[in-house]
Amino acid sequence: QVQLEESGGGSVNSGGSLRLSCVISDDTYSSNCMGWFRQAPGKEREGIAAIYTGGGNTYYADSVKGRFTMAQDHAKNTAYLEMNRLKPEDTARYYCVADRASCMTWVPYLTLPDMDTAYWGQGTQVTVSS
């Protein structure tokens, strides 16, 4: 079973920064895409950034564009999310997802991936206070 583990969450003041990491534990699994989603209490899970691991465009939600940067280290099976100028409305649990079969159906649109082909981490909490 492929496992993803996020880290780097925490509590910061508004305007602060955090860097999230997501490691895929199975070295034999080669993803074709990875993404970051977040879910606040009482809200649906939303896609905020996604990337094709072989190169190409990175896609961002309007709510984070210009503040968040997604990067990847394909050799380490790791993705990162650099979050700057954090706002209280960024408070949520952040999840990493990896996929290799249905990337084209969700990466450009930041929609939820196919649950039969994607692997999710357990999430890491980000809390931004005003």
Image (spheres, rainbow, N blue to C red):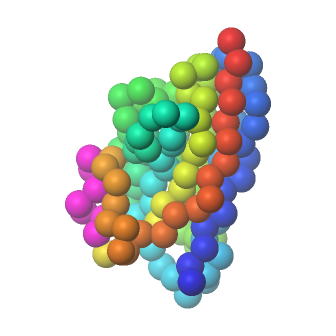
Judged from this view, the residue extending furthest toward the left is 105
- Taken as a whole, is the magenta stretch helix, strand or loop? helix
Instruction: Let me know if residue 105 is in the magenta part.
Output: yes
Say above or below: 111 vs 72. above
Left or right of residue 62, residue 85 in this image: right
Residue occupying the point 73% across, 46% down: 8
Residue occupying the point 60% across, 42% down: 93
Which sits in the foreground, 37 or 56?
37
Left or right of residue 44, residue 81 in this image: right
Judged from this view, the residue extending furthest toward the top is 130
Q: Is residue 56 visible?
A: no
Q: Quadrant of the N terminus?
A: bottom right
Judged from this view, the residue extending furthest toward the front is 42
Residue occupying the point 41% across, 40% down: 44
**Where are the magenta residues, as a range?**
102-109
Question: Residue 64 placed where, x, y %?
Answer: 46, 30
Instruction: Let me know if residue 46 is in the magenta part.
Output: no
**Number of numbered labels in the structure image:** 0
Residue 61, picture quadrant: top left
Question: Residue 53 placed where, x, y %?
Answer: 43, 65
Residue 81, picture quadrant: top right
Say above or below: 77 vs 40. below
Left or right of residue 130, residue 120 in this image: left
Q: Is residue 12 visible?
A: yes
Left or right of residue 16, residue 61 in this image: left
Residue occupying the point 51% across, 42% down: 38
Q: Quadrant of the C terminus?
A: top right
Question: Residue 103 placed where, x, y %?
Answer: 31, 65
